[in-house]
């Protein structure tokens, strides 16, 4: 029997005990790691580890839009289209489509970056200090501001990739549940209908059920077929696009006419182009009428006050333009006092401008004009001097520089009638506002005691005074009313032009022409005269220019007055006869 070495036996026992301890510690560590937070370890791991046992670094749901988009952080340039395709194919809900669209749009606009620390994808926008503000792509919430460029990496793209991205965006939008979004997508594709876009449009046309979208798709497909080598396709496309007002259609037909094409195609292209031009001219006339009515609405507000004061008092108020200016500056001051309530500042400015300009008017009448009754030349010179004083007062308080009044949100933008005709909301609102003021003024003149007194004094001042009407009080209130309406005209003007010391001077001459043409003191004549002068100006301006158009209108009104000295609607009464 052999003897056992005690040293070897001791080493074996120690080795066995150590192995048991190691196994026990491994078991404990495994159990603890399964239930503990591993956020400290995760940043050390690659976001797309080849080890399937490792969880996704940034996304809890494997295969989600975020996790697919995360591949863009490490993808090579030639692999980006395949990642984008994967994004589109996995976007099955509206929320997923919107998120995929946000990633692709950010990449197309060059604003998709990844953090160098953890490869997280972010939306990065350059600041004025040449640093970056980082935003969450999903909800566009600010993550971090003033980030150094070295800490982020831009996801690169090329012209080829960007072209693919535009097509991909259109692909997502064409399958959107929103009809307007699909129409917008087709319109965007019409700017460059290549073979790939044409195939996409044809596929969408087969699936589409909405009539408006179908028609838009037909237009886009016909536009793409204009570049076809098949003569029959080109002829069919030209026949379909007859009268189409899309700018891309006109450009494509012009390009087709500049090429060597068969006679049959050339003659049909000329016919199609002529039909489009006729519709463009017709819409141009409608636009001129709209701008004429818009100018007429301003002249109506300006001239209504003049018509009342001149009809009642026989005063030619050369300071009327400055009362318009005061209304405009009142609007500017109100907006300064309400910087956080721009949407409501205009509603506050309307009564404020009316009151301020009205008080200025009453002050002018009580302080100057009442002492010059029966002396029209002295009144004209006095009011001219007052206009210069008011202009200099504004220059002293606000400086000679023009001031801008911000339009409320509901007055911004335009009503798009068709691709070549749009009506701006601010001018539509001004037109409606002018008509509302006009009819309220008519109501005041016919249904109130003030209106009755004003009409009485305007028709026969001496008889009105004999009946106990205080003509001095009527004169002051009438001048204040006319000045207040001028203030409202100033509010309206702030929505289409800047506010400056010479604001009212641009409209005062035309407004005098309106009063004389329509009939002194007659509001209906002022209405007809304002819209006639406005429309005539806008139709002449493209041919003769602004200055010559004004001169021609003035000459025409002078010739008209030679035939009808009292205007379109002459004032009635003994005073008018005398």
Image: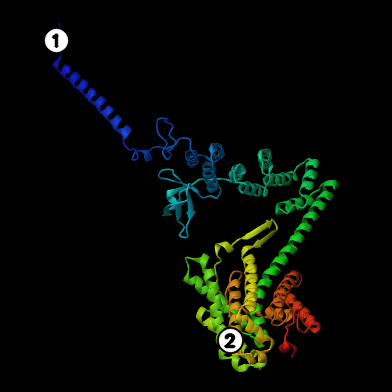
Q: Which mark is residue 138?
A: none
Q: Secondary structure at mark 2?
A: helix
- Taking depth in this image into account, of 432 and 137 the one nearest to the observer is 432
Horizontally, residue 218 falls left or right of residue 447, namely right
Q: Residue at x 72, y 83 (%)?
A: 571
Q: Reading the chain from its start, which is encountered first: label 1 or label 2?
A: 1
Horizontally, residue 453 falls left or right of residue 406, namely right
Find out whether the residues at labels 1 and 2 contact each other: C-beta distance under 8 Å. Answer: no
Q: How is the image coloured?
A: rainbow
Horizontally, residue 94 falls left or right of residue 531, namely left
- Taking depth in this image into account, of 417 and 31 the one nearest to the observer is 417
Residue 291, position as x, y percentages in the image: 69, 67
Q: Residue at x 74, y 53 (%)?
A: 250
Residue that extends furthest to the right in the rendered view of this protein: 263
Residue 483, position as x, y percentages in the image: 59, 81
Q: Quadrant of residue 17?
A: top left
Q: Taking 175 as reference, is 249 above or below it?
A: below
Q: Which residue is mark 2?
A: 476
Residue 15, position as x, y percentages in the image: 21, 21
Nearer to us: label 1 or label 2: 2
Residue 204, position as x, y percentages in the image: 66, 40
- Marks 1 and 2, Cα distance to the nearest angstrom? 136 Å
Q: Which residue is mark 1?
A: 3
Q: Quadrant of residue 527?
A: bottom right
* Residue 413 appears in the rendering: yes
* Residue 401 appears in the rendering: no
Residue that extends furthest to the top in the rendered view of this protein: 1
């Amino acid at each position: 029997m052999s003897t056992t070495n005690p040293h070897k036996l001791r080493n074996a026992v120690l080795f066995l005990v150590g192995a048991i301890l190691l196994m026990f510690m491994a078991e404990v560590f495994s159990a603890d790691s399964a239930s503990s937070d591993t956020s400290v370890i995760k940043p050390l791991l690659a976001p797309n580890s080849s080890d399937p046992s490792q969880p996704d670094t940034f996304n809890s749901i494997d295969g989600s839009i975020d996790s697919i988009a995360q591949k863009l952080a490490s993808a090579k340039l030639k692999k980006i289209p395949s990642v984008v395709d994967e994004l589109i194919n996995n976007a099955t809900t509206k929320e997923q489509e919107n998120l995929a669209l946000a990633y692709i749009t950010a990449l197309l606009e060059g604003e998709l970056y990844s953090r160098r620390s953890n490869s997280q994808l972010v939306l990065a926008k350059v600041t004025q200090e040449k640093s970056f503000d980082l935003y969450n792509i999903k909800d566009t919430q600010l993550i971090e501001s003033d980030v150094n460029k070295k800490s982020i990496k831009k996801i690169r793209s090329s012209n080829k990739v960007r072209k693919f991205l535009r097509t991909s965006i259109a692909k997502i939008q064409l399958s959107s549940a929103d009809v307007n979004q699909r129409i917008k997508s087709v319109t965007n594709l019409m700017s460059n209908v290549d073979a790939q876009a044409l195939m996409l449009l044809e596929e969408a046309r087969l699936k589409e059920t909405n009539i408006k979208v179908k028609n838009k798709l037909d237009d886009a497909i016909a536009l793409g077929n204009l570049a076809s080598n098949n003569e029959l396709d080109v002829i069919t496309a030209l026949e379909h696009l007859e009268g189409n007002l899309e700018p891309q259609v006109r450009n494509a037909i012009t390009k087709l006419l500049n090429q060597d094409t068969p006679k049959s195609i050339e003659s049909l292209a000329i016919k199609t182009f002529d039909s489009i031009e006729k519709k463009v001219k017709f819409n141009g006339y409608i636009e001129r009428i709209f701008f004429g009515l818009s100018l007429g609405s301003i002249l109506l507000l300006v001239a209504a006050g003049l018509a009342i004061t001149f009809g009642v008092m026989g005063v030619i108020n050369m300071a009327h333009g400055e009362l318009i200016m005061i209304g405009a500056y009142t609007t500017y001051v109100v907006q300064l006092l309400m910087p956080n309530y721009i949407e409501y500042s205009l509603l506050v400015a309307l009564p404020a401008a009316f009151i301020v300009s009205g008080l200025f008017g009453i002050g002018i009448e009580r302080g100057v004009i009442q002492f010059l009754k029966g002396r029209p030349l002295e009144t004209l010179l006095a009011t001219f001097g007052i206009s210069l004083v008011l202009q200099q007062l504004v220059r002293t308080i606000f400086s000679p520089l023009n001031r801008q009044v911000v339009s409320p949100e509901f007055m911004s933008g335009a009503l798009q009638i068709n691709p070549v005709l749009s009506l701006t909301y601010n001018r539509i609102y001004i037109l409606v506002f002018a008509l509302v003021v006009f009819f309220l003024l008519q109501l005041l003149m016919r249904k109130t005691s003030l209106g009755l007194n004003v009409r009485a004094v305007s028709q026969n001042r001496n008889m009105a005074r004999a009946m106990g009407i205080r003509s001095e009080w009527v004169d002051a209130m009438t001048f204040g009313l006319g000045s207040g309406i001028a203030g409202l005209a100033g509010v309206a003007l702030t929505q289409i032009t800047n506010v400056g010391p010479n604001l009212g001077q641009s409209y005062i001459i035309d407004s005098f022409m309106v009063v004389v043409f329509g009939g002194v003191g007659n509001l209906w004549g002022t209405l007809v005269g304002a819209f006639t002068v406005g429309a005539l100006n806008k139709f002449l301006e493209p041919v003769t220019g602004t200055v010559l158009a004004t001169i021609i209108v003035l000459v025409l009104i002078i010739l008209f007055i030679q035939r009808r000295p009292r205007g379109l609607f002459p004032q009635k009464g003994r005073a008018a006869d005398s």
